[in-house]
Image (tube, grey):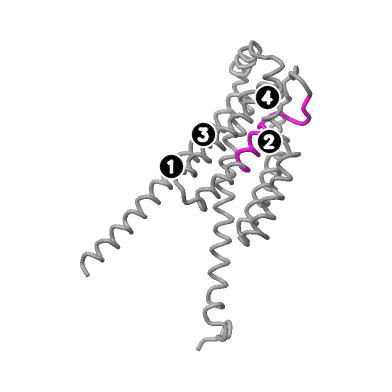
Amino acid sequence: MIRKVREKIGKVWASVALLSIEIIVVGALFLGAFTGFVFMVRRVFHLHDTKLDYEVFNYLSKHVNGTNNSIMLGITFLGRHEFLIPANLFLIFYFLVVKKHKWYSIKVPAIALSSLALMFLLKHLFGRERPLTPLLEEAKGMSFPSGHALMSVTFYGLLIYIIWQSVKNKKLRLALTFALILLILLIGFSRIYLRVHYTTDVIAGFCMGFLWLVVSIWVVDQFEKFSKRKVSPIVENPTKPIGIEQ
């Protein structure tokens, strides 16, 4: 009996320790992302320091060729709305119809649409012009923060969150996470290579995308918990009149 109690206590403590580590890691990343975004805003709009942006452009110009151009165009497409809109619709259909997971099917459009609104708001607010000499094709709209970077973090970051919630195989989970993080970084890099964004735009997009992803997931999770609390008493005791003391 005592042994079983000890085992249960051990499992509880292990779960608490794991949860605490996750909270610390996410909290540290959140603080780092917030600090990074504020630093980029200060660097670009208060100090008017563009040294990093042009140093990166000058370095990448030495590696421009037809093969790299094709690769970067292919990678950047994975962060464009022509790809992300169908991808989001597919995920909504998959979770709503196939997996019957209502809250995942809500998280996907909620995070996608709010991220899009936030991106346009920030671009309008900061109003930074894009680089004057794009490599292949001119991009429309304002430059800061990078929409590709922001939207890639929220979309592929949500996929990482879902993977950690649903994939049990640890090695597969880590492999998928690494692949998606690498993809996010490459999409941001492609925008700099193609000279449609400055390096500071992309860093700011990454930071704000992560901030918004964490906040959005937390908000939707609170709605999910609230919904379950409201529904559970009715499901457990459907004959009990609502709002009447017995």
Between marks 4 and 3 in the image, the one whose residue lies nearer the viewer: 4
Kindly report the distance in space between the C-alpha atoms of the residues bearing marks 1 and 3.
15 Å
10 Å crowding of disc 4: few (<14), some (14-19), many (20+): few
Between marks 2 and 3 in the image, the one whose residue lies nearer the viewer: 2
Q: Classify mark 2: helix, strand or loop.
A: loop
In the picture of the structure, the residue carrying the numbered disc 1 is 25
Spot occupied by residue 193 in the image (x, y as percentages of width and height):
66, 21
In the picture of the structure, the residue carrying the numbered disc 2 is 79
Q: Residue at x 68, y 60 (%)?
A: 97
Vertical placement of 50 versus 140: above or below?
above
* Mark 4 or mark 2, earlier in chain: 4
Q: Classify mark 1: helix, strand or loop.
A: helix
Tag 1: amino acid: Val
* Mark 1 or mark 4, earlier in chain: 1
Could you say which disc has been placed on residue 35 in the image?
3
Pick the front one: 101 or 113: 101
The magenta stretch is 138-155
Q: Classify mark 4: helix, strand or loop.
A: helix
